[in-house]
């Protein structure tokens, strides 16, 4: 077991292999570059050997902990992996493959391929009258295309899709990209404690999650760029969800992310041990979002509004009302009033709306709400 790190730091263990999946030579010189979530270079040492452990990397408890690792060596193409999710006081393992500049694919012969994974064999034989001939011709004339196909097939193999139920399971550094479209709505009246608020119902739609189970997934597309393609009256942006595991249940229309779960979108950032996303009957509309255990959120300011952030045991978002319910035992919501002061509200159950500047209200009559104005602002980093 790797020794623990200091409370505000973490470590990354980089395991480096060559194109044959064998450990890189112990005497090979390597330039290692590690960038944090803001793409700021943290270290760039020259090292050697197949296993490199980098310690004392700053832990921020926000998106800055999504590190990128680059490895360069003469005679090889550069290797990189993103995101490497740093953990406080622990060591995270990641793997990088370096391919030689003059490297070539080495494919199994057709006869040897018969003993390979049955799903990969089906992939290369599907639709061919003479699979052996097509496979041999492709590896001789189009080796890069065949190599790409087998690589993608190996990655997709780790995603389990049940044809009979429509359920999907993915594990190990799961990343989903969803295009979310939300119709703009008029600003609702501010709610008053004990009186329901009248809130126009926006329409929210999302594509089915596109899931990647490789740590080398591409960086998310710009939300600003996505917004440019929106229809009139519709805000479109990408929502990125990451976790250790994703289970999609088609009957319940629920996507459940567990293990260091995080969801980042145009509206803000939600983190928790588990996040659940519920779709409506059409399968495209988002009806509800749930965050469980060690919940932390950071909501961006709406036009004319103020940013909010906080934490609690559970957070529920109802899309039709743009309503949030945060529960405790100690739920905390902070709202920025101006650059120098904030309003902090504490209680067992707190309710607020993203579409207006209403004060946070306590929806639990048996609990005591504490509101402080003028507290020092310590907004989490984006």
Image (cartoon, rainbow, N blue to C red):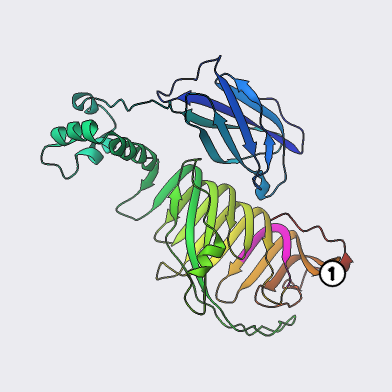
Residue at x 50%, y 49% (from the top left corner): 175
Indicate whether 79 appears above or below 368. Answer: above
Q: Quadrant of the C terminus?
A: bottom right
Asked whether the viewer can see residue 237, the reply is no
- Magenta range: 306-316
Residue at x 54%, y 50% (from the top left corner): 242
The local crowd at label 1, few if under 14, some if 14 to 19, many if 20 or more residues have their Cα within 10 Å, is: some
Q: How far across and how far down the image is residue 342, in percent?
A: 83, 67
Q: Is residue 252 magenta?
A: no
Residue at x 29%, y 32% (from the top left corner): 117
Indicate whether 357 appears above or below 28. Answer: below
Q: How far across and how far down the image is residue 186, in percent?
A: 60, 84
Residue furthest out toward the top: 27
Instruction: Read off the residue under disc 1.
Output: 371
The kind of secondary structure the magenta stretch mainly shows is strand
Indicate whether 184 appears above or below 345. Answer: below
Q: Quadrant of the N terminus?
A: top right
Q: Helix, strand or loop at disc 1?
A: strand
Asked whether the viewer can see residue 327, the reply is yes
| Figure quadrant of residue 113 | top left
């Amino acid at each position: 077991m790797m020794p623990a790190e200091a409370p505000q730091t973490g470590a990354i263990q980089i395991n480096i292999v060559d194109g044959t999946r064998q450990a890189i030579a112990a005497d090979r010189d390597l330039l290692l570059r590690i960038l944090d979530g803001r793409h700021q270079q943290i270290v760039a040492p020259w090292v050697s050997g197949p296993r490199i452990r980098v310690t004392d990397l700053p832990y921020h408890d926000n998106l800055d902990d999504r590190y990128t690792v680059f490895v360069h060596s003469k005679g090889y193409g550069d290797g990189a992996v993103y995101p490497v999710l740093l953990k406080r006081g622990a060591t995270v393992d990641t793997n990088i493959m370096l391919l030689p500049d003059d490297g070539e694919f080495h494919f199994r012969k057709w006869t040897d391929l018969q003993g390979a994974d049955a799903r990969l064999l089906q992939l290369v034989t599907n639709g061919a009258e003479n699979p052996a001939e097509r496979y041999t011709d492709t590896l001789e004339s189009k080796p890069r295309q065949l190599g790409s196909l087998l690589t993608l097939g190996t990655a997709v193999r780790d995603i389990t899709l049940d044809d009979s139920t429509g359920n999907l399971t993915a594990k190990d550094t799961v990343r989903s990209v969803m295009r979310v479209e939300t119709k703009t709505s008029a600003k609702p009246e501010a709610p008053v404690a004990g009186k329901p608020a009248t809130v126009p119902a926006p329409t929210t739609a999302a594509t089915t999650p596109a899931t990647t189970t490789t740590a080398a997934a591409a960086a998310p597309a710009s939300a600003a760029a996505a917004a440019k393609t929106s229809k009139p009256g519709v805000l479109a942006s990408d929502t990125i969800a990451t976790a250790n595991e994703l289970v999609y249940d088609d009957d319940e229309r629920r996507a459940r992310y567990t293990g260091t779960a995080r969801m980042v979108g145009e509206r803000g950032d939600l983190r928790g041990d588990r996040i659940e996303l519920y779709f409506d009957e059409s399968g495209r509309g988002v009806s509800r979002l749930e965050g469980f255990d060690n919940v932390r959120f950071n909501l961006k300011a709406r036009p004319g509004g103020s940013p909010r952030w906080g934490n609690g045991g559970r957070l529920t978002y109802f899309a039709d009302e743009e309503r949030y319910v945060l529960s405790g035992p100690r739920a905390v919501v902070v709202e920025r009033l101006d650059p120098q002061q904030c309003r902090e509200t504490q209680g067992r159950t707190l309710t607020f709306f993203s579409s207006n500047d209403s004060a946070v209200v306590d929806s639990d009559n048996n609990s005591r709400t504490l509101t402080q104005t003028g507290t020092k602002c310590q907004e989490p980093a984006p």
